[in-house]
Amino acid sequence: MAATATRTHFRVAIVGAGFSGLCMSIRLLEEGIRDFVVVERADEVGGTWRDNTYPGCQCDIPSALYSFSFAPNPNWSRFYPLQEEIREYLRECAQRFGVMPYIRFGHEVNEAEWDEDRHRWRLQTSGGEITADVLVGGMGGLSNPSVPTIEGLDQFEGTLFHSSHWDWDHDLAGDRVGVIGTGASAVQFIPMVQPQVGHMTVFQRTPSWVMPDPDRPVTELERTLWRRLPITQRLLRSVLYGFFEATVVTTIVNKRLSSLLERVARRHLEEQVPDPVLRAKLTPKYTLGCKRITLSNTYYPAMSAPNVEVITESIERVTPGGVLTADGVEHELDTIILGTGFKVHDNPAFSRVRGRDGKTLREAWGGSPRAYLGTTISGFPNLFLLVGPNSAGGFNSIIFTTESHVNYAIAALRTMAKRGARVAEVRRSVYDRWARETDRRLANSVWNEGGCQSWYLDANGRNGVWWPGFMAGLWLRTRRFNPAEYELRPA
Ligand code: NAP
């Protein structure tokens, strides 16, 4: 029963056709549930890996781990997957598992409201209204670019774009380019752009910790082995999982241990940046891990190139011809590239989802998103967020969380069907207790106490991003759906 354009009611509606939405769709089909629809605002699958096309875009989790457990890919060209390859992998999975007929492309959800009388979600989309018994949010945290509120930005007369919407029609050759931001995205695109441009001015507020990049091409021998003996790739996946799981020791258990990794990063900086003035500018003053650790062998050489200037003075405002910094210097520019990240805690989707008592997620959360096990929310019946608040795993693969949450949603659907329940809503006491437990377990983590300001902390200073422990714990707790933790209401 594919989602033909005429149908308007479904058992399940999934928002987004990125990793999460596709995973949920595949598992529903496996479960024999065909009464579902995927609403996707773009005209292609892929989510953040479709949108972020900036030069050098690559995942910092190895390819053997950054893929669905049920769809290993022996064809990766590199140890760490490139953006185009991940996008292609997702396209292939959508085709191979028969998800495409269920997706309505070009459908943006403008509002999703719980209808308490009819026990269903009512979605107003750009392509019309649809209703569903269960709503699954696969919107992703890194889907809406954050454009900084810098005075004059809208009056800049040159070319301006964000890293997640790269302007490929604009030729950067010979340009005077300004880059605002030095996070994970900028660390990847700066080395690719620097050789093309006339001059590059990098406006750095906080330096990133940069580790040596172990990436390399996958050899033909490895690919053949993975094809002929798939267990070898699965073994590699398990080893990598174990390695990343172990890093929880440095983030949550004892953040002082991250000084061991800091030593490696400092040596990398010393080897690659001989100029002591520049080196001082590029040396972070917070504990490694507090912000995303980046991997690059080309970032420091690019930042040291003669056509690059690193400005640490704060930005006063943007002028029609460039950027004025606090020291009164105007930096003349033809192009500004914003590497300023994403709206994570203030995701516009949070204002569009309205629960049982008429409040939006944003209003219910008061600036601090939270969810039971990262997926269900009191006051929002029959809603499952995939990779919701506090469910990303330290340095581990986010796909692990996606699959755990999908298992949980499927288990909930099974329980509801078995018990003849129409509505499942997490009990307030369970929801509140989980938030308290999460806060307590993260209180001394490197993200909370590492001495930095990052997007992991919301406006109230709460860490709403990371799972508070080992990922095996998330897997264990989401393997089964415990009906005692929910109010189940019949039809
Ligand atoms: P980000 O990590 O949030 O970095 C944003 C950068 O912009 C920071 O350097 C920030 O400075 C700066 N900034 C923001 N507003 C500013 C302002 N008003 N004035 C000056 N500077 C400003 O964003 P991102 O680099 O796009 O990365 C986001 C996330 O995407 C990462 O954490 C990671 O999870 C993911 N990502 C992963 C990969 C990968 O797998 N390799 C690659 C790219 C992105 P402050 O630090 O001072 O706030």
Image: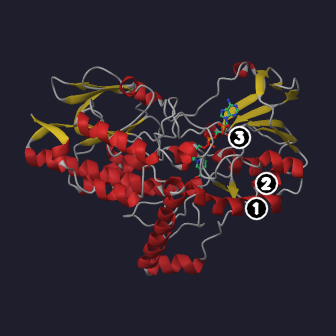
Image quadrant for the C terminus?
Answer: top left
Picture quadrant of ligand 1:
top right
Q: Give whichever of 462, 244 is nearer the camera.
A: 462
Percent x, y of residue 75 = 52, 68
Q: Residue 30: x, y in percent?
A: 25, 57
Q: Left or right: 368 with respect to 175? A: left
Q: Earlier in the sequence, mark 3 or mark 2?
A: 3
> Measured from the top left, where is residue 47 in percent x and y?
48, 44
Question: Left or right: 47 with respect to 438?
Answer: right
Q: Secondary structure at mark 2?
A: helix
- Residue under label 2, please give it: 300
144 relative to 448, above or below: above
Res. 382 in view: no
> Could you tell me the amino acid type at mark 2?
Tyr
Q: Which residue is mark 3?
A: 206
x%, y% of residue 72? 43, 67
Q: Could you classify mark 1 by the number of other residues whose Cα lies within 10 Å: few (under 14), some (14-19), or many (20 or more)?
A: some
**Mark 2 or 1: the one toward you:** 1
Closer to viewer: mark 3 or mark 2? 3
Q: Residue at x 78, y 32 (%)?
A: 335
Determine if residue 113 is in view: yes
Does label 1 or label 3 sit earlier along the sequence?
A: 3
**Numbered marks: total:** 3
- Numbered circle sitting on residue 438: none
Please state if 222 lies on the left or on the right of 210 as rendered: left
Crowdedness of circle 2 by 10 Å Cα count: few (<14), some, many (20+)? many
